[in-house]
Amino acid sequence: MQTRKFVVNNVSQAIQVVKKEMGADAIILSMRTVRQPNGPFGTRQVLEVTASLDRPAANPEKSLHAAVDNNASPADEAREVELSLADVMREMGVLRRRLEIMEETLAENSLEQKLSQVATNIDELQHSMREVLLAQDRREQSDEMLYNGDLGRLVHDLRLSGVGDDLVRDLLKDTMQRLGKRSLSPDIYGVDYLAQSVMDHVRIAAPFKPGHEQQIHMIVGPTGVGKTTTIAKLAAQQVFGLGRSAAFLTVDTFRVGAIDQLRTYARILDVPLEVCLSDVEVVETVHRYADKDVLFIDTAGSSQKDAAMIGELAKVYRAGVPMNVHLIVSAATDSRNLHEIAERYGVMPLTSLIVSKLDEATRFGSVYNLMHDARLPYSCFTVGQNVPDDIEDATPERVADLLLSIAAK
């Protein structure tokens, strides 16, 4: 048996070096973190890898099976073992190729041998999947294990809030880099710098700020998220708060109650309301109210699966008048549905994200994930049913507090 040791920077490099120097049949026996002289800079942390080979490499498609040093702590294992689903997919590809070879040589092998080999391959795949799942679990736990006190609790809070694991790791990495540059202790300054990292990653837009030209805002989103009430709050800010002239348009002809509700708000705000039955009527109405500072277009709520309804809204957007399209979603919606909603309504260029029902949600992570993944900036949040009070401009500080509950602490 041929045994060799290599010094590398990380697990990924270890696999590449062992495969290059010893072939694809090599087996990684152990990995351990050691300190190595680093010239005038003292020492640096590296990975010492022990690998063996008991026969010449025969099949370059066979994957390496890594085993972590049993003496390593759970936190060390989480840092050293960087397995991912990509490893499982590669392993499945290798096994698929083995099965193809077995099928080609079926005439030469007995059925019993064939079944035995299949069972062996299944066992290997199950073992690989278990390794990946365990490594991922250790990696998630390590973030909280590595940091004590308030910083560790805030990392835990981010996960409980529903922030994606990749985003949590990115925020924590950014926090530690900032602390390291200033030689600051995570136990003392970690909370402040984590909050600052969250705020720096928040996207904010101010599309309702007065400009020199007329503004047209169309509010779209699924049923039941509070589009009509939100439009009334936004209009009240413009009319009462900024002294601007406004008008309501609605293309929601499916719900009589919605039109009546908007008519009530129009009467309170003393602004006109027009019901438009087509994209052509929208254009005509916009031209008729060219003297108004701002126009708000209310739309029918529809499921993200209703492609026909969303297509009709897209026709309004493409009717020929410049407008901002704002997607409104409920903070109580889970991440998967939020991403599907944004994808379907994304047939129109979306200007901003309005988050409603903050007062009803217990977790904010799902809409943070959406802001990041869809690259949609927040514009405002609604926190209740009261018109015009229960609406606020989105700010990075507010987002950080929603995720970390800093104000409460």
Image (cartoon, helix red, strand yellow):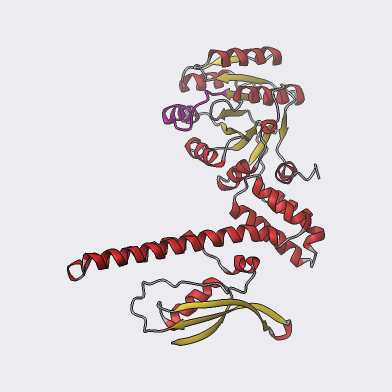
On the question of residue 211 being in view, the answer is no
Residue 16 appearing in the image: yes
Which corner quadrant holds the N terminus?
bottom left
Residue 139 found in image quarter = bottom right
Query: Quick one: 87 or 353, which is closer to the camera?
Result: 87
Q: Image height check: is 277 above or below 147? A: above
- Image location (x, y in percent) of residue 125: 41, 62
Question: What residue lies at 64% left-to-right and 58% top-to-bottom?
Answer: 141
Percent x, y of residue 127 = 45, 64
From the viewer's perspective, tell me whether residue 61 is left or right of residue 134.
left
Task: Give the magenta-colored segment's residue range.
Answer: 298-316
The foreground one among 356 and 349 is 356
The x and y percentages for residue 34 are 65, 79
Specify the farthest residue to the bottom.
2
Q: Give the quarter of the figure containing the C terminus.
A: top right
Q: Is residue 386 magenta?
A: no
Q: Residue at x 70, y 81 (%)?
A: 43
Q: Is residue 233 above or below residue 43?
A: above
User: In the image, residue 193 lies at what x, y percent?
Assistant: 76, 56
Please, which residue is most extreme toward the left here?
107
- Residue found at x 45% / y 28%: 315
Q: Is residue 312 magenta?
A: yes
Q: How many marks?
A: 0
- Classify 304 as above or below 176: above
Observer-nearest of 294 and 142: 142
- Using residue 251 as the reference point, say whether residue 390 is left or right of it: right
Res 26 → quadrant: bottom left
Residue at position x 69%, y 60% in the image: 145
